[in-house]
Amino acid sequence: MVDAGGLNPPDQQWSYEFESHPGHTEGVTSGPELRARLEARVSAMVVDIGQFVDVESPSLSLDDLDRSAAFLAALMTKHLGSAPEVLQTERGPNVHWRGGSSPKVLVVGHHDTVFPKGTVASRSFSVDGDVLRGPGVFDMKAGIVQAIYGLSELDDLSHVEILITCDEEVGSYSSRELIEERARAAGAVLVLEPAADGGAVKTARKGVGTFRVDIAGRASHAGLEPEKGVNALVELAAQVQRIATFGRPELGTTVTPTVATAGTTENVVPAQAQIIVDTRVNVPEEKVRVEAAMASLVPTVVGSTISVSGSINRPPMHESASASLFALAQRVAPSVGIASLAGVAVGGGSDGNFTAAIGVPTLDGLGACGGGAHAESEHVMVSSMAERAALVAALVAELAK
């Protein structure tokens, strides 16, 4: 039975069964030995990943996130030898494991997923040869399990912290401060987001933000007296055209209207409209420019009003933030059987954006190999699991020296 930091109500506890592991009777002496030990445990990893995936954890679904955190706390306790703290926030529980009081490396992940409650009922975890499928398996539950297994093979975890947060998929608003605090304390960050194509790690990321443009007009009968209305849909059309000019592709800046809504029925002049805008920036100065441009939107239809909310809340992760850790990863990768480890810049954001922006060396994309993040096609390759677990463990061992 699991008591995960008082998460469970008095009349209910969560019970999980995990593969037994003998513990650290002898420290790993080489990369090949580390890889071999983890290869022998792949079937156990698959079982734990399956259980974790089927404990669904949609962002902001607090009861589900509680169950997910309880599972994760039990998994860490079993394989790492001590229990983590489960830290409640208004958006759900963060799970924080510490090997000691003097960290040298922080391993970061998230246990929330983008899939709505009930997805597991229609599409639960499955294994098909070399492929694992299920909601959240790639982003990023398999990566978390791999890392826990990898770290469990190290003899000394006294300089290691693991922080698995609850709201990365919805902006990390409740966890950002803690992530940054623990990153500063540790001095190096490894992020368990999924690997890029071909198993590449992620050495740079764009800054990411979302804006919402709310437009207010006035309703009237579209046939009898349209002139008495203020058409919010016409205003929306003008603003979409304006917003579409804010990007600067030559700098890597994209400003993309992605969702538009307006109107209530076919014979009423629309009184309300809304535009959602996705924004990505490579250059820190572009954050200021784009936010100012969005704030400068003014109505074109007489009588309408515009309200803009949102920001670029994840700053860019420049490749300079990952340079030292990527060089280290390239040095240790061959010892665990990865002949050539590539690094790529990607457009998506992660919690690594925050740690890189405050000057802490950060390497991202150390999680599972597979594809289909946030889609029904999401999957993980079983044949890559041991090598990725070994890579994380080897990096941690080097950083903890």
Image (spheres, grey):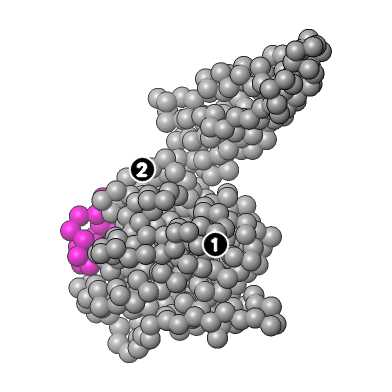
The label number, if any, that marks residue 345 in the structure image: 2
Q: Percent position (x, y) of residue 46?
A: 35, 71
Count neighbours of disc 1 (C-alpha within 10 A) and say few if under 14, some if 14 to 19, many if 20 or more: many
SS at circle 2 = strand
Tell me: 86 left or right of 16. right
- Amino acid type at circle 2 is Ala
In this picture, residue 178 sits left or right of residue 349: right
Which quadrant of the view contains residue 62? bottom right
Image point 44% across, 59% down: which residue? 123
The residue under the point 35% across, 88% down is: 22
Which residue lies under the disc numbered 1?
A: 57
Q: Which mark is first along the chain, 2 or 1?
A: 1
Query: Residue 175, position in %: x, y?
Result: 60, 58
- The span shown in magenta is 326-342
Principal secondary structure, stretch drawn in magenta = helix
Name the quadrant of the C terminus: bottom left
Where in the figure is residue 273, as x and y percent of width and height? 68, 27
Q: Secondary structure at mark 1?
A: loop
- Say what amino acid the circle numbered 1 marks: Ser
Residue at 52 percent across and 74 percent down: it is 71
Using the image, determine if residue 401 lies above or below residue 27: above
Q: CA distance from mark 1 to mark 2?
A: 28 Å
User: Dots 1 and 2: beta carbons under 8 Å?
Assistant: no
Image quadrant where one finds the N terminus? bottom right
Closest to the observer, 13 or 89: 13
